[in-house]
Structure formats: C-alpha cells, structure tokens
RNA sequence: CGGGCGGUAGCUCAGGUUGGUAGAGCGCUCGGUUUGGGACCGAGAGGUUCGCAGGUUCAAAUCCUGUCCGCCCGACCA
C-alpha cells in the first residue's frame, strides 16, 4: 500500500554491521550516549532487559548455594598492587581518585576494574577455619576500565556486571566450582538467550591477569568476530597468598585457600543484539523481552468493540506473559514498525475484522509470519509460541555458526581461513605463546578457547611443531 | 594512542569554497478528520546564532588555531 517511508530506516545489517548495531541500540531505546565519553545511559527498556537477564543468572547462582553481597567501589592502591600479575594486567585501564573533600589523598584510590583485591582482603578477615569454607559470594555492581575505543554494551568505561568470588579448601573443589559456573553461563546463553556458545579454557596469552586458568564462553558475531560472553577463573593459591586468605585445616595445619572468580557483564546484551537482530531492528529472546507480547488494536471511528476486546485479551494473557496493550494514538502501521525495531517477540493485531470473526492476528517477530488464531485459543498458545520462537532463534543462530566454523589442519589452509575473517577456525595447536603472537601478527586472529587435547601425532596448524591441543581461533571484540 | 570523517532546531541534514547576521524535511503542540504496514488538513512553537575556547575581520555557522565528543580503520585490551 503506502510504500513511502516517512521515517528513516536503519542500514541493512549485512551492509554495515557497526552502524546497524549503533542505530539499533539507540532506536530500540535501549541506551543513549551521555556527556561522559564512553559511558552510556541505560534507558528503561534497556534496563528492563538487563534486569531480566540478571534474574536468570541470579536464580541459578542462588540455586547453587551462592549469596549476594556488596563491596566498595574504591580500592586503595596498596591493596590492588599485592598480586603482581593482576596489577600489571589492569594498570593501564584503571581510573584513580586522587582527591576527596577538596584535599589530596595520602593514598590514591582505584575505581574498581574488578574486585579481587578488596574482596580478597575482606575474605582474609572472615576465614579462619575449614569450617568457614566454602565461601560462595556474588556481587552485582558496576566496574570501570579506561578503554580507548568504546561501543554501547560491548565496551564501555563503566559497565554493569556480576562477579562471583569463592573460596575453597581444596584445589579440586575450586576447579569444580569454576566449571559449575561456566556451565551456568552456557545454559543461560544458549537455553535462555538463544545464543550458541563454545566453552573452553583460555590460552596463556588470553587468560585473566593473575589466574592459574581461565575458562570462557564465546559467541560468534555476524562479522565473524568472536565475543567473550562470560569467564570463570581458577586462581589456585595466587590470590590467597597475595591477600593472605588462610584457614586451619582438619589436620591442624594453616593453609592457603583456593579461590575462584567468574563474571558476566551487560556485554552479553551486545551479543544478543548482533546475533539475533535483523534489518527491521532488534529481535529479543522471549525469556528476557521486557514485553513478550504487544497488542495493537485497530480502532475505526465509532467502533466500540475493539478496545474492550483488546483489554480483555491483555488481562487474560497477562497471567502467563508480559503483555503490553499499545493504546497510544499513533497509527497501527507506526506501532508495528516501532515494536519490530524494539524486538518484541509476538505482536497481536486486533481489529473489527478479528472481533467479528472472534479471532486475532498473531505476528512472530523472528519470522514476520502472520497467523489468524481463534480468540479462545490464543491464551493457551502464547507460551508455546514463545518457546517455539526461542528454539527457532537458537537453531538459526546455531546453523549460522556451524556454517562459519571450519576445521583446518595445514598451514596454508589455516592462515587463509583466518585471513578470510569469516568465523571460527578449529585447528591443532602447539599451545606456545610465541606461536599465538605470530598468528595474531599475521592474521589478527587469536585463540578464543582451547577445545581439548590434540590427537597423537598431530602438528600445529601454524608452526608445525607437535600439537598439544585443538583450539578455536578468530578475531575478537 | 595513530590515520580518516563528522558536530548547525528533538532527529536527519542543507548553508561554508565566493564572510553580510540561519533554513528544509521529519518530529513536537493545538483543532479537526483518520486508524488492517511508519495517515491527512489547518494553525503554531522551537536555535541563549551553528560542540566549546581563542584568533583574523567593520562583520564569522562560514577563514585560522586549539580543545571536547561521536563514528570508521588500526594499535591496545580478561
């Protein structure tokens, strides 16, 4: 019908992912830029999305015995520097407070880039006996890292995240914790957010500053770059020695404990946006969509049947889903575009024709499919439809990732695949740090995670030395 | 941090080279008609004067210098 575009649309996702991404973030009203460089404002719709994601993680943390707590934003420099590798890793991106109350501070205070230092310090006071262990605490908070290049959600100076910090009597128990939490990250990413990820250990170069081992989940973005969507770290006794976290064990000996930390940030929202969005805008996974269903009434002048029917429908559906009845003055077409941009999974159109036929028109955001559904059946079908959308989104993303993951064994094949920058390249690798740096210099790709041990006799796809592992390589965000 | 581009109404942008005192479309407000894919008509408001600070000039949105912010590429980065 009316094809003239009154409102500027966003560029096609495939043409310019960066611009598309920025436009979707802004026009879906998730975030806005602020007068502070690199710091975004989370608007109500974006914050609602974050709260729903938080709830999915938080529920699982609690179910595995963790409690939430809160620690200071400011960390005295003397505490931060106690773990040498840790401070070296974070030093370039720490912001410092040097004045307070109009006076120069005697010791400058770091704005936390992460809280190992302050939490470790507190733990040393709280733990004396093996009976005090394990300590299973999580903190939801903001942190700050002085990044040079920033983008909404993916890399901002200040960001919201969660950091779990646990203490254990044995290395084995700590290792188990690290895997348990990594699995929760995978579960939320895949089963809730429909975001397929690979799970594995990080290389020496890529691991967390001060960690004995780092594990991560990595998602693949449409431009072939990998996005680290969650990390879980084994610290061994590195931090317990630095922060003096000791306990008297059953054998009456004083021992250093084993600690872990694990974190997920709002960066995962950036992953969702890029993985699922399309040329019309955002496509949200139903489980975390602030509005799972939007009802758009089509009211002709003089009609008195549509609005009451729409309100009844809203009340009925609200028992099982988050429903919004959009009764604003704008035209129906305007609302369709608006809610498509904002990623609402299901739209229900109800007009005089529907009312007359005792049905509604249901439109799926992921497929843009329109179906007439009898009014009497819609309430029962919404939950199933939402689940079907999640499954369909996951399958589409999985298929895409599978098509962009290749195995390479020989040097030329490996280098060419990485230079195409088209996705994950799985290859046998020697696990040497120098080799990884060489690969990066030539292809700008790095290891994302180590999938497992190499087959006996395999050689490194890049340098030809004996392979120790099989690793996923890609460029990264 | 290096290279490139940009900043003028809420938004998208024109004006700039040839300095002369700021415009369009959309949005917004009011009234009316409308409403099945971003409706239409009429009236109206809206810029401390063009990111900010200096400079040149009788005169700067326009020229010069610096600076801040944003975007892209690169470097860097759990």
Image (cartoon, rainbow, N blue to C red):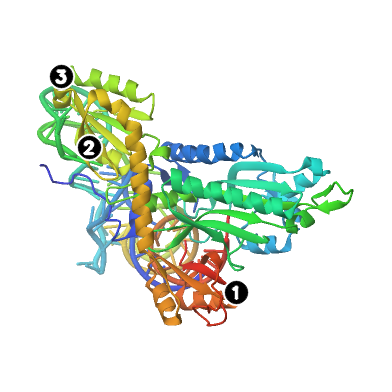
The residue at the point 38 percent across, 61 percent down is A402
Does residue A84 appear left or right of residue A213 in this picture?
A: right
Look at discs 2 and 1 and give the one toward the viewer: 1
Query: Is residue A112 visible from the viewing direction of this image?
Result: no
Look at discs 2 and 3 and give the one toward the viewer: 3
Numbered disc 2: secondary structure: helix
Percent position (x, y) of residue A357?
15, 24
Q: Earlier in the sequence, mark 2 or mark 3?
A: 3
Say which residue label 1 marks. A433
State the image quarter where residue A145 is shown. Answer: bottom right
Percent position (x, y) of residue B62?
31, 62
Structural distance between the alpha carbons of marks 3 and 1: 72 Å
Q: Earlier in the sequence, mark 2 or mark 1?
A: 2
The residue at the point 25 percent across, 41 percent down is A337
Read off the chain for label 1. Answer: A
Structural distance between the alpha carbons of marks 2 and 1: 54 Å
Read off the chain for label 2. Answer: A
Respond whether the residues carrying marks 2 and 3 are from the same subunit: yes
Percent position (x, y) of residue A355?
17, 22
Percent position (x, y) of residue A251?
88, 49
Q: Residue A245, relative to residue B33: is it above or below?
A: below
Does residue A88 appear left or right of residue A410 in this picture?
A: right
Closer to the camera, A333 or A40?
Answer: A333
Say which residue label 3 marks. A303
Numbered disc 3: secondary structure: loop
Say which residue label 2 marks. A334
Closer to the camera, A140 or B61?
Answer: A140
Look at discs 3 and 1 and give the one toward the viewer: 1
């Amino acid at each position: 019908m009316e094809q003239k575009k009154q409102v500027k649309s966003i560029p096609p996702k495939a043409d310019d992912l960066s611009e598309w991404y920025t436009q979707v973030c802004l026009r879906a009203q998730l975030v806005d830029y602020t007068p502070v460089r690199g710091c975004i404002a989370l608007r109500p719709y974006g914050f609602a999305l974050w709260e729903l994601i938080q709830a999915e993680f938080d529920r699982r943390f609690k179910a595995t015995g963790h409690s939430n707590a809160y620690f200071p934003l400011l960390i005295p420099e003397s505490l931060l520097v106690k773990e040498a590798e840790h401070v070296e890793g974070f030093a370039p991106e720490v912001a410092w407070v040097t004045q307070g109350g109009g006076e120069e501070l005697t010791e400058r205070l770091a704005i936390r880039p992460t809280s190992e230092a302050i939490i470790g310090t507190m733990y040393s006071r709280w733990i004396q006996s093996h009976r005090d262990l394990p300590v299973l605490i999580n903190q939801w908070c903001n942190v700050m890292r002085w990044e040079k290049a920033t983008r909404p959600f993916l890399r901002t100076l200040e960001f919201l995240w969660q950091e779990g910090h646990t203490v254990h009597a044995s290395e084995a128990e700590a290792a188990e914790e690290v895997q348990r939490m990594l699995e929760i990250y995978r579960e939320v990413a895949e089963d809730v957010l429909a975001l397929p990820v690979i799970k594995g250990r990080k290389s020496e170069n890529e691991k967390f500053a001060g960690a004995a081992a780092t594990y991560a989940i990595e998602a693949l973005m449409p431009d072939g770059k990998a996005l680290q969507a969650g990390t879980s770290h084994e610290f061994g006794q590195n931090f317990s020695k630095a922060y003096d976290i000791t306990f008297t064990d059953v054998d009456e000996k004083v021992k250093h404990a084993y600690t872990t930390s694990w974190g997920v940030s709002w960066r995962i929202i950036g992953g969702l946006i890029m993985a699922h969005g399309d040329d019309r805008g955002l496509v949200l996974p139903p489980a975390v969509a602030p509005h799972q269903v939007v009802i758009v009434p089509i009211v002709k002048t003089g009609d008195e049947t549509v609005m009451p029917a729409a309100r009844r429908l809203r009340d009925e559906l609200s028992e099982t889903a988050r429903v919004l009845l959009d009764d604003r003055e704008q035209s129906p077409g305007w609302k369709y575009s608006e809610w498509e941009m904002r990623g609402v999974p299901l739209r229900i159109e109800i007009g005089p024709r529907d009312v007359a036929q005792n049905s509604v028109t249901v439109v799926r955001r992921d497929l843009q499919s329109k179906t007439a559904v009898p009014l009497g059946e819609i309430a029962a079908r919404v939950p199933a439809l939402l689940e079907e959308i999640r499954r369909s989104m996951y399958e589409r993303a999985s298929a895409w990732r599978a098509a962009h993951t290749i195995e390479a064994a020989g040097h030329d094949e490996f280098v060419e695949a990485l230079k195409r920058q088209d996705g994950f390249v799985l290859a046998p690798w020697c696990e040497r740090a120098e080799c990884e740096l060489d690969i990066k210099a030539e292809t700008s790709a790095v290891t994302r995670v180590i999938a497992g041990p190499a087959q006996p006799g395999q050689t490194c796809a890049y340098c030809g030395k004996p392979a120790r592992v099989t690793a996923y390589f890609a460029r990264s965000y």
